[in-house]
Image (cartoon, rainbow, N blue to C red):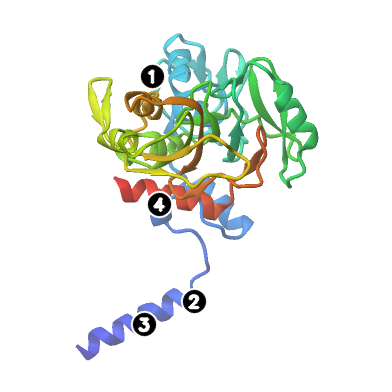
Amino acid sequence: MAEAKTTKKDKKKKNDNKPSTPSASSSSGSAPKYSKAARRFYNEKIREPQRLSKVLAAAGVASRRSCEELIFEGKVTVNGSVCTSPQTRVDVLKDSIYVNGNRLSKKLPPKLYFALNKPKGCLKYKCADTGIFAQMARNQNRLSPYSMTISRVGLCFQNKTNPGIPKPRLFTVGRLDVATTGLILLTNDGDFAQRLSHPSSELAKEYIATIEGSVHKRHLLAISDGTQIEGVHCIPDFVELLPVQPDASRPRIRVVVHEGRNHEVRELIKNAGLQLHSLKRVRVGGFKLPSDLGLGKYVELEQPDIKLLEGNAQKST
């Protein structure tokens, strides 16, 4: 036993004398934060190749599925040869990749995460009336290296501080129907979006439903009993009648669900015999819509917010 203890101490001393360079065990995760030389060594010697379709999607070419279609159609070449298999392993730093004759940049856009207070009339990130977003872009005073630019096909973020990096392709995490306002997340991180939006995550979503007319106990019980949606009986996690606000005459109901089926909260309200005036999402997992975030405005998520959302999704699975 004494000899074994001595061996462990000797190993510890040897490890203490080693330079702090990334080890092979770190290859399964993201590149560790070491010196510039160590990061270069990691990228050149340890970095594992990734699937071609994933690399194209991460570079902002298109969605993962659309990238697969481009590959199947023979519009992608790797090191001068046409590649028709999305599963082909490539290294964006070493391999020469072309899409429709355009070379893929070796600098991938950074991972971005935003929370948007979606206005009414906006489906996913396509907006029927861009006036609100244009005003938002002009009045945006939050510190962020990205500015929101508006067009009739949707909204995107243009990187001003790093013009050499390709423009990121943002998409929504989950969905909100055209008439629902409130919290919706945008990102270019496909893995993050998949973890949060996959049904197995059972991530809680909180809504505030404003009702036309009176709300009685029987209505709340009917909502709590659930209803049939797409052949599945959906039951909310929590239902509560909120206190009356001095500046609002209509009653409000707080509804928390986790299944996220299409129009789930609207169907629950309708099945209870109530008429919905407006619907707003105020929470996803542990992240709440900031109270000072105006309609049509956005905020970049901090690392604690991202870890909180990912932690909520992992606990649910």
Give the secondary structure at mark 2.
helix
Give the foreground label among 1 and 4: 4
Q: How many marks?
A: 4
Earlier in the chain: of badge 4 and badge 2, it is 2
Per the image, the residue denoted by label 3 is: 10
Q: Nearer the viewer, residue 272 or 205?
A: 272
User: At x 42% / y 77%, what residue is drawn?
Assistant: 14
Give the foreground label among 3 and 4: 4
Q: Are marks 1 and 4 in contact (CB under 8 Å)?
A: no
Give the foreground label among 1 and 2: 1
Res. 232 in view: yes
Q: Residues within 10 Å of mark 1 (few under 14, many from 20)?
A: some
Q: Residue furthest left?
A: 1
73 vs 115, left or right, is left
In this rendering, is residue 9 above or below 267? below
Per the image, the residue denoted by label 4 is: 311
Per the image, the residue denoted by label 1 is: 85
Q: Amino acid at mark 1?
A: Ser
The percent coordinates of residue 192 (x first, y second) are 45, 40
Per the image, the residue denoted by label 2 is: 17
Earlier in the chain: of badge 1 and badge 2, it is 2
The percent coordinates of residue 127 (x first, y second) are 62, 19
Q: Residues within 10 Å of mark 4 (few under 14, many from 20)?
A: some
Q: Amino acid at mark 2?
A: Asn
Task: Classify residue 174 by image quadrant.
Answer: top left
Give the secondary structure at mark 3.
helix
